[in-house]
Structures are given as structure tokens and as C-alpha cells.
Image (cartoon, helix red, strand yellow):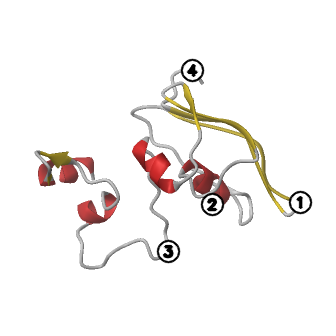
Amino acid sequence: MTDAIVEYRGISKFFAGIRALENVDFACRPGSIHAILGENGAGKSTLIKIMSGVLQPDAGEMLVAGKPVSFATPQAANDAGIVCMFQELSLVPDLSVADNISISRPPRRFGMIDRRAQVRRA
């Protein structure tokens, strides 16, 4: 897992003694498509929430570009380039797909939103 841009090692999370995640490893490599699949209750949402700073892991290590990170808030994850769009209530119906995707971190140029970059990114 050395060429990963984002890597999670040994991630564990417990809620009131209930194991939601235990020793999970996950890596994202540039230019690849990634999926997190599993049955209901497998911990997919918990892992995504840890990745995006909504929750903090009880154990494990997170790395971005090979450097250890810790996200205390979603904004901290956002600042590192990690953004999560949750399935429920995440879309603004009056916005375009590109606007919804970049709603929390729109590309800017000269202080203005760069629409061309926004569409390319989407």
C-alpha cells in the first residue's frame, strides 16, 4: 500500500462496547475507482464518517500522501481534500450536478468560482 494517496490502517471504532469496525485497512490509489461494499451493519457508513472527519477512530492510523493525519472535524478532512456527500439530504435540487459535487469546496480562480474547473472536476 505504498503508492496510496489516502490510506487507513487498522481502523477500529466501538459504540458503547459494540464493535462497528475492527482493524480495517483501506487505501485509495490515484487514477483508480474504489468501492466500499458490504451487508447492512458491516460498518461502511462508519468508515466513511471516519474518513470524512464526522467520527474519530478509536484505533488505527490515517495517512494522506504518506503523512499521518487526524481529522477532528469534517472541515479538517475537507481542507485535506477529503469530502463526503452523504446519500440522504445531500443534494440541493436547484443546483447542477457540478454545483452539488463541489458545494463544500468549489474550485476558485481570482477569488471567483471557476465554473470550467468545476465541470471538469465533476
**Sequence-first tag of 3 and 4:** 4
Would you name the residue on which mark 1 appears?
17
Q: Are marks 2 and 4 in contact (CB under 8 Å)?
A: no
Q: Say whether marks 1 and 3 touch (CB < 8 Å).
A: no
User: What's the CA distance linking mark 1 and mark 4?
Assistant: 33 Å
Q: Answer yes or no: do the residues labelled 3 and 4 have beta carbons within 8 Å?
A: no
Which percent across, then down, holds residue 114?
Answer: 14, 51
Amino acid type assigned to the residue bearing label 1 in the image: Gly
Give me the residue at 35% from left, 59% from top: 104
- Say what amino acid the circle numbered 3 marks: Glu
Q: Amino acid at mark 4?
A: Thr
Tags 1 and 4 touching, CB below 8 Å? no
**Up/down of 90 relative to 39, above or below:** below
Across and down, in percent, residue 5 comes to: 48, 30
Q: CA distance from mark 2 to mark 4?
A: 25 Å
Question: Badge 4 is on which residue?
Answer: 2
SS for tag 3? Answer: loop
Element marked by disc 4: loop
Mark 1 vs mark 3, CA separation in Å: 27 Å
Give the image location of residue 92, x and y in percent: 32, 75
Query: Quadrant location of the N terminus?
Result: top right
Q: Residue furthest top?
A: 2
| Residue at 64% from the left image edge and 52% from the top image edge | 47
Q: Residue at x 23, y 49 (%)?
A: 107
Labelled disc at residue 45: 2
Query: Residue 9's quadrant in the figure?
Result: top right
Could you say which disc has been placed on residue 88 in the image?
3
C-alpha span from label 2 to label 1: 18 Å
The relative height of residue 31 versus residue 13 in the rendered view (above or below) is above
